[in-house]
Amino acid sequence: MAKLDIDKKLAAKKGRPMSRFMGSALRTFLATPNSKKMNLEVIDEAGMKDVKGPFVLLSNHTSRCDWQYVALAVKPHMLNYVASYIEFHRAHMHMIFDLTNVIPKKNFVADAHCIREIISVIKAGGNVILFPEGKSSISGTNQPVALGTGKLLKHLNVPVFTTTITGGYLSNTQWNIADRPGKVIIRLKQLFTAEETQTVPAEEMEQKVNEAIYNDDFTWNETARVKYKGTEHIAEKLEEHLYVCPKCGRELSKQ
């Protein structure tokens, strides 16, 4: 019954801009100390302090901590995050998502309700962040952005910015949630003006988004040589992500 109640509540949910009080509290008491521990460096090439909203922000998705890095990169602006519908059914996440007006998105399908909430937030003067790959990285690099991203940007008709996170996957791997402090860099750029979203073809916009947010943590660190601190437990659960034999190269083989 509890799950059904949440489904009903989400179906009736209206898009409202992030509360400045809640956004500031999360930024101050969670994002700032955690990002400092991870040695976050923000490279702002967009001049966010002078940007006037509303706008859309698109980012690569490296780990569960990305929201913290993004929140600091766009300071002083508030953001409405779009998160997986499934996450709202986690007991420890539902309340905080509700308080911060997080927008639910059903995975791997078109979601008209999600789009209506995004439009509502934008019309009310809020800013929305999307992780257009649809899920966090499984390998330290990107997946293609979801089809339809370009059409959505055209419909919203607001400036589009991007953040590219580097080092996030190596700091918080998929197989082990333990923090590995080393270095995280987030670079912020403006990708399109509102006018450009109306003139650039949707398919071309999606390609430009793919290019703008592309990152490969392992390739980057071949040169950067950042050391990530770990413990003797850092490889725990790694076997759940391995599917290629390192000796023969066969997939899904125990030989």
Image (spheres, rainbow, N blue to C red):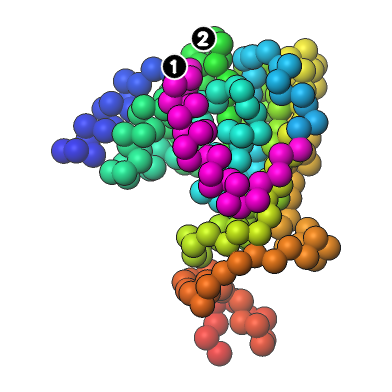
Identify the main secondary structure in magenta.
helix
Quarter holding the N terminus is top left
How many neighbours does mark 2 have within 10 angstroms: few (below 14), some (14-19), or many (20 or more)? few
How many neighbours does mark 1 have within 10 angstroms: few (below 14), some (14-19), or many (20 or more)? many
- Given residues 113 and 139, the one toward you in this image is 139
Q: Point out the residue furthest to the left here.
A: 1
Residue 137: say if magenta.
no
Q: Between marks 2 and 1, how big is the CA–CA gap?
A: 7 Å
Q: Amino acid at mark 2?
A: Ala
Q: Point out the residue furthest to the right here.
A: 223
- The residue identified by callout 2 is 124
Residue 117 in the image: x percent, y percent? 46, 20
Rendered position, 168 above or below 28: below
Numbered range of the magenta stretch: 17-43
Contact check, label 2 and label 1, Cβ < 8 Å: yes
Q: Is residue 144 left or right of residue 11?
A: right
Q: Amino acid at mark 1?
A: Arg
- The residue identified by callout 1 is 16
Residue sitting at x 56%, y 57%: 172
Quarter holding the C terminus is bottom right
